[in-house]
Image (cartoon, rainbow, N blue to C red):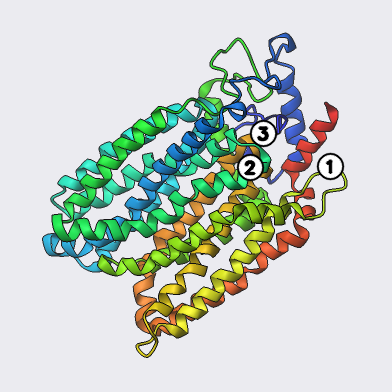
Amino acid sequence: MRAFLKVLCPSVPSSLLFVAFFLPLPDLFTRECIRCQSTHQTEFEVSWTKNDPQNPQNWSLPYKFYVVFAMRYGETVISLSSTSYSVSIPGLQDDFHITKITGLLGITTYLLGLAVGSVFLAPLSETLGRRPVYLMSAGLFTIFVLPCALARNIETILISRFVACFFGSALMSNSPGSVNDIVRENHRALAFGFWSIGPINGPVLGPIIGGFVFEYLGWRWTNWLIMMRGDLALVSVGSVEETYAPETGNPKWWSPHDTHLPFLSFSKTNISRPFIMLLMEPICIFWDWYVAIVYGILYPCFTPGIGGLAYLGIGCGTLTIITLEPLLRRWINTHPKDPSTGKIPPEAMVRVTCVGAILLAVREVWFAWKSTPNVHWIVPILAGIPFGAGNAAVFIYSNNYLAHSYGVYSASALAENTVFRSIMGAVLPLAGPAIYERLGLEWASFLLGMIEAVCILIPFMFLFYGNRIRERSSMIRKMQDIDRWQ
């Protein structure tokens, strides 16, 4: 992937998004890449040797395990905070005399902060490195949770949650990039599986943990708990070394990923990159929308209080997929190899996503028609197992697919994925109560199941035609052209 940065050379002006509609994209990138190459002196070029111990992919296995754990914990704090707030809504209604919909806005503003922050902070990690952004993110997130705990009105809570998650978003959107930095291709799915316990099970654990805290200590303590966890996240991510390989820290030397342009110019291009990829990369367009729909349907499932224990089935399903990773990897490796490269193509990972997509639709239909008083309570709870397994399969292996496709720019590719799923997660909780009230539990769940059933076409499209889609990608095609030039 060393030539990929040359394709996205930061000397491309920030107005590329507008110009690209009038100028053929490959020609524009070609001129910018050639102009960028001419500014470097080859005698100062640096790259990794085969067994360089400073190469993040050559770190020891225990330390890699710790890095993934630190990334997972930081992301767990952010995702847990998104739903633990839901249990405090009755307390907010009593203290501030607000409606339930107004209380739900706290989830909406939080996830919108996550979406907006991901746009700016994820690409920034490809300018400054991962570690400085993590330190800033965890520190400011923890600070801005404080006004929520001390709030005297709902406006303070809504604004503070937006700002807190704006800064905390880097722990969500950048952590998959860090995981991708340190693992090799054959272990990427396992690493992403272990890491995904945080983002997938965090929203599940939020109502459970927050429910007990709210019941015995009050709604303010749900925020104090998040602050304490945020401090631990700051310590954990702060103890991790820099994982982003192109970050040399010395302007005299350059790697094939560096350009040494002025910081502001470099940052503008990095911030605009996710939008370019979103509007012009079919891989990003389809996967972002699909994961957003899956993630959006997940959020209305959470209910305040002790009832959240019913959603432990979702967590069990998630852990099942992670446990089965070695078997799934063997299945992936049976996929026919690409004749041109002799390697397993990225579409092999989509096999698991297809199974996950089917499980999601099956669960919604199962839950829709078995959540009635004449059916034993364990039946709808068991429906959470295929739901959790489907979410995990889609989440892990779609991230894997994007990371495999975009390499050192996985943070940018996954940032827009985070943006879309956060926006969907922010909107649906507001619409959820009205949908379930008008249609009833059975028909509302059945409607969601039908939406997920239609969306099954997306992963199957990539399974059968993903190679053609990648061949028509202007960025990937240009990357392959530059590899041939070298």
Which type of secondary structure does the marked residue at label 3 adopt? loop
> How packed is label 1: few (under 14 Cα within 10 Å), some, or many (20 or more)?
few
Which type of secondary structure does the marked residue at label 1 adopt? loop
> Earlier along the polypeptide chain: callout 2 or callout 1?
2
> In this figure, which residue is indicated by the disc labeled 1?
341
Residue 231 drawn above or below residue 387: above
Tell me if I can see residue 177 in this picture: yes
Which of the two residues, 40 or 457, is positioned nearer the viewer here? 457
Q: How many marks?
A: 3
User: Which amino acid type is shown beneath numbered disc 1?
Assistant: Thr
Q: Name the spot of residue 199 as percent of width and height, x first.
A: 45, 51
Instruction: From the image, state whether disc 3 or disc 1 is nearer to you.
Output: 1
Left or right: residue 193 compared with residue 135 = right
Which of the two residues, 89 or 336, is positioned nearer the viewer here? 336
Which type of secondary structure does the marked residue at label 2 adopt? helix
Q: Quadrant of the C terminus?
A: top right
Q: Are the residues at dot 3 and dot 1 in contact (C-beta closer than 8 Å)?
A: no
Residue occupying image coordinates x 39% and y 51%: 79
Question: Which labelled disc corresponds to residue 187?
Answer: 2
> In this figure, which residue is indicated by the disc labeled 3?
8
Q: Label 3 vs label 1: CA separation?
A: 23 Å
Q: Name the spot of residue 56 as percent of width and height, x first.
A: 58, 27
Residue 459 drawn above or below residue 282: below
Quadrant assignment, res 70: top left
Residue occupying image coordinates x 77% and y 55%: 334
Q: Quadrant of the N terminus?
A: top right
User: Which amino acid type is shown beneath numbered disc 3?
Assistant: Leu
Instruction: From the image, state whether disc 2 or disc 1 is nearer to you.
Output: 2
Residue furthest toward the right?
Answer: 339
> Earlier along the polypeptide chain: callout 3 or callout 2?
3
Residue furthest toward the bottom?
Answer: 374
Q: Label 3 vs label 2: CA separation?
A: 27 Å
